[in-house]
Image (cartoon, grey):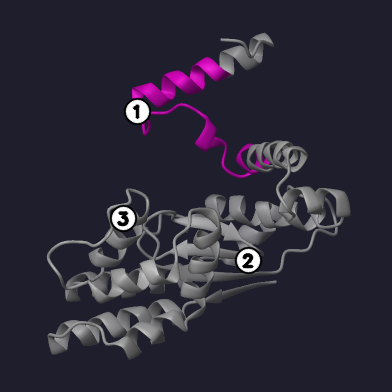
Amino acid sequence: MVVVEADGALVFLDVLEGSLRSGRPLSDGEVERIFSTGFMSFMVDAYSSMIGLTRADVASFLRNLGEENPVSVDPVKSMFEDGFRSCYDVERIAELRSNVEKILGIDFEGAERMALSCLPPETVIECTVYLTVDAFNPGMVWEGGMGRSILSPVRDGGDLSHLAHEFHHLGFGYWVSKSPALERAFRGEKTHDSVAARLVLHLIMEGMANHFCTPSMVRPGPWRSPRVNEKITRYTRRKSGGCLAR
């Protein structure tokens, strides 16, 4: 079952628009209101674990939206700050509200069915899709949830294949959870053995999702840079020749 949660993103836009129209920075209460949303809890939980982005980091970004210079000097964290700052404009907020409506019109159940068609029978996908404000990753899964950033435009066809890719990850995780040994390796304490197991599991997970749902992501094409096209072609040639050596 898939549930799409857009209320948090709309609260974020409402708070920013109120700040802009009244000509004042976000109050502490407004910052806390944003932190109370599902999407922000999802993002902080995910990225604090993955890259060390803390609640304090995000709070400093939100309190600094109207200032001339950003506060972050970290090249990764600054991507999140730049994303929030890009929203601090009345016209941009109107565009983002339109993005929310377009995303809500996507056939998420169709994307789920596409993923399930490439997974074993009896796979269960239980997922809340949070509409996020994420300049770092337009789509990602974390602990059974999914983030879909409103900063990314909706492609023709509603991104079904890319959403199916993310749902496939959740279906893969469902079966991993059925094996206590794999579950410990995938999510438990990091040891040398578990890191090796996680690497293999992630390679399999990403490889299957790309192969079945988004094959264009691992194929050359005119939409890619010459450097990336050359690298993909080289890897494909090595695979076809049965040799992975340089």
What residue is at 69 percent from the left and 11 percent from the top? 242
Image side of residue 90 versus residue 166, left or right: left
Of mark 3 and mark 2, the one earlier in the sequence is 3
The residue beneath circle 2 is: 109
Task: From the image, tell me which residue sits under label 1.
Answer: 225
First along the sequence among labels 3 and 1: 3
For disc 3, the marked residue is 78
246 and 214: which is toward the camera? 246
Q: What kind of element bears circle 1?
A: loop
Residue nearest the observer in this picture, 15 or 209: 15
Residue 82 relative to residue 141: left or right: left
Work out how far the residue at label 3 is from the one at label 2, CA to CA, in angstroms: 34 Å
Q: First in sequence: mark 1 or mark 2?
A: 2
Give the magenta part as a residue range: 208-235
Discs 3/2, front:
3
Q: Which amino acid does label 3 sit on?
A: Ser
Is 175 on the left or on the right of 74, as rendered? right
Q: Mark 2 and mark 1 in contact (Cβ < 8 Å)?
A: no
At a point 24% along the width and 66% down the height, the residue shown is: 85
Q: Position of residue 62 (x, y in %)?
A: 29, 73
Question: Image quadrant of residue 238?
Answer: top right
Q: Is residue 54 magenta?
A: no
**Front: mark 1 or 2:** 1
Q: Contact, CB < 8 Å: mark 3 with mark 1?
A: no
Q: Is mark 3 on a helix, strand or loop?
A: helix
Residue 32 to residue 220: above or below = below
